[in-house]
Amino acid sequence: MSQLGLGVCLGIVLLIVAVSRYFALMKEVREAAREQARRDEKYRQVLEQAKAVEHEEKVRKAQSGHIPSILSLAKENEIGNLREAVSWYQKAAELGNEIGQNALARLCRQDVDDPHGEARSRYWTCIVKANHNDPEALFELGRYEIRGYGTAINTASGVGHLIQAAEMDYVPAQLFLGDWYVVESNPSPSPRSAFFWRLKSAVNRDPKGCIKVAYCYQTGIGVAKDRRRAIYWLEKATELGSVEAQYLAGKMHLNYDQPVTNVTDAAVAYIWFSVAFASGYQDAKKERDMAVQHVGIESILNVQKVAKQIYKLVHNPPVPEHAIMDLLDKVYDRSKYRPTDAELDGALGRINEDIDQVDYQTAAPAAPAQSGGTGSAPTNWSGDMVTTESFTS
């Protein structure tokens, strides 16, 4: 055989060996890949089992109140399952965790399937701020709890938060409590408490509080009737800029259901109706025109002069304390009543003692509030209780 033939045979043999080796190697690679895949699958199953065991343990701990586990579960669900995340954050928040509370304030409004989501976000926002003794947040939180806005109705807790805010001299809370304790929807009314909080707001120089204290003195809500003190607080409100108080001060001096026998009352009523009308209170015009019939012709010019002086005072604030009262007392020889700060503080202390004593004597589980019943005073949950208070002399 020639050398060429031998070379060809040798090449064929080498090619066969190479191809065989190639297929052998490929088989080994495939076997190795299959073995690796089996190992990876087994490892994945082990990991999944471990994760499942870990998740079960985490859920068990979370259900027992373990805060880190609760927050971890909530975070895991925040992207894919918002409702589940909110549920876990709710559990953390109810255990007093501020991270959970902040998360609810942020996430509840994002739940488009929850019709109360926005209300719940606002409620938890108030909770977070109230934790830092923010009086406005305590006030809003109290109203939300009484109203059931964003949370279940909890009157006792709501009143507690309102009292916290009121004790920090937050006037809106004081005014709210002053109304709350006398509305028919309150299961535990307390006229004495109503008067206490109204007086606190008045002492804090709130004109609306002064008007409400005057109404208490006029009608005997939580305090003995006292016309002179009612007039004092109304005129105090006028000095603080209340046009409504100007009109009501006039009403206090005249009662059209009875004959007018006191010329001084008629003159002072005319003055206040004139000032109120000049200040933009339209209803005062009719009252002023009725009051003038009881003012003598010979004194009308002097009465109008006093009205102008008072108008100038109220429209150039701040009005010096008692300046208007001093003027009226001097011109009409009225009996003077000027409570000092010490006297008012003492009165508040005595009223508080009375309330504490009554609370102690009548301590008992409160009857649940009836929702939707007839006879309840209407409420405006933007802030103020709606009452039917009106003034007459």
Image (cartoon, rainbow, N blue to C red):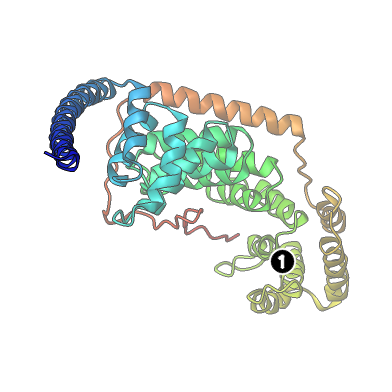
Q: Is residue 354 left or right of residue 81?
A: right
Which residue does the image show at 79% across and 45% down from the upper left?
A: 336
Percent across and percent down for residue 25 are: 18, 31
Q: Looking at the picture, how far across and down is residue 113, in whole percent? A: 29, 56
Q: Which residue is labeled 1 in the image?
A: 269
* Whether residue 347 is situated above or below residue 61 in the rendered picture: below
Q: Is residue 71 left or right of residue 171?
A: left
Task: Please state which of residues 33 and 96 is positioned toward the viewer in this rendering.
Answer: 33
Query: In the image shown, does 43 or 367 lie closer to the viewer?
Result: 43
Q: Nearer the viewer, residue 160 or 80?
A: 80
Q: Residue at x 47, y 59 (%)?
A: 388
Residue 313 seen by the camera: yes
Location of the N terminus (image quadrant): top left
Is residue 192 something that shows in the picture? no
At horizontal 86% and vertical 56% (from top left) the residue drawn is: 327
Quarter location, residue 303: bottom right
Q: Is residue 300 above or below residue 268?
A: below
Quadrant assignment for the C terminus: bottom right
Write the residue at 83% across / 68% down: 307
Q: Nearer the viewer, residue 155 or 357?
A: 155
Which x, y percent locates residue 300?
83, 75
Q: Amino acid at mark 1?
A: Ala
Seen in the image, is 354 located left or right of residue 20?
right
Q: Quadrant of residue 283?
A: bottom right
Percent across and percent down for residue 76 are 33, 36
Q: Is residue 182 left or right of residue 288?
A: left
